[in-house]
Image (spheres, rainbow, N blue to C red):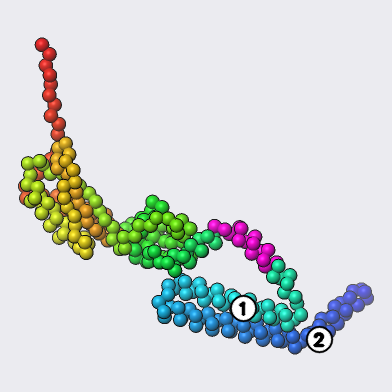
Amino acid sequence: MEAELQQAQQIYDLIVNYLVTYSFQILAAIIIMIVGNVVANKAANFLEAFLVKKGFDVTLSHFTASFLKVVIIAFAAIIALGKLGISITPFVAAIGALSLGAGLALQGLLSNYGAGVSIIIVRPFVVGDTISVQGVTGVVKEVKLAYTVLTNEDEVDITIPNKHIVGEIIHNSKANTIIESTVGIAYDSDVEAALAVITRAISTTPGVGLEKAPQVGINEFGDSSIDIGLRYWVPTTELFTIKFRVNQAVFKALADNNIEIPFPQRDVHLIGQD
């Protein structure tokens, strides 16, 4: 029991001596960390507000400000450790080793973040654009550092890791999507009249984008009909709704103008035997 008390007394004396000897250094280290934290917060807030004011992307502005804050606090910690007489060389080596291991383990995640920064800076698309990439099409809902979220008319969210976007071929049709379809008319129909009727039906259908005029013309000559090609733009978020509306309008317009949509037909010749 006496030996334990002596050991506890030695530890107590050691702590007291350390505090007496390094009290000013400890106080200085605490002050440095407090000042560093205050400076980091103010610098980060100022930088983020400045970047947003200059028109930079909000996500990039927040990321840059957060990175600056971490750097300032790290420098403050290094200075504080120096005041306590603690060598930072082993810490630097350990951080380097941990960073290497973490980099290898999180290679995919870091690739996504790097690609996200590239997207935010280069801006190949923005929120509200319609893009097609990796066989997926949708309206850009969010652009995050790690991933991009697309949505469609059914309000289904499609999450794409950014590393699968950067370096790929991207189709960007802004807010609209082009619809291509065909309708057949009889060979004895007035083609010019049919083209005019179809064009008018498309142009007067609510929701069809008129920034680019609808394209209507002879697409090909089928076995039973002249196939008329239709091309027109619609908002991506209402793609199927407006497509069905246009199909109904075209069908009604052709019927009202006595333009026949023929059934498939074949001529069959029977060769009799004597």
| Left or right: 102, with 8 as reference point | left
Give whichever of 201, 98 is nearer the camera.
98
Give residue 15's mark. none
User: Does the magenta run of residues contain 133?
Assistant: no
Asked whether the viewer can see residue 237, the reply is: no
Give whichever of 218, 61 is nearer the camera.
218
86 is higher (above) or lower (below) than 99: below
Q: Look at the numbered disc 1 and give the secondary structure of its residue.
A: helix
Q: Position of residue 167 (x, y in %)?
A: 45, 57
- Part of the protein shown in magenta: 94-108
Q: Quarter of the image holding residue 232?
A: bottom left
Q: Position of residue 13 (x, y in %)?
A: 86, 82
Q: CA distance from mark 2 to mark 1?
A: 26 Å
First in sequence, mark 2 or 1: give its number.
2
45 is higher (above) or lower (below) than 155: below
Residue type at mark 1 is Ile
Q: Position of residue 23 (x, y in %)?
A: 76, 87
Q: Which residue is mark 2?
A: 21
Q: Quarter of the image holding residue 211?
A: bottom left
User: Does the magenta run of residues contain 106?
Assistant: yes
Residue type at mark 2 is Thr
Give whichever of 227, 20 is nearer the camera.
227
Q: Quarter of the image holding residue 56?
A: bottom left
Report the number of discs: 2
Q: Which residue is mark 1?
A: 73
| Residue found at x 93% / y 76% | 2
| Residue found at x 35% / y 57% | 171
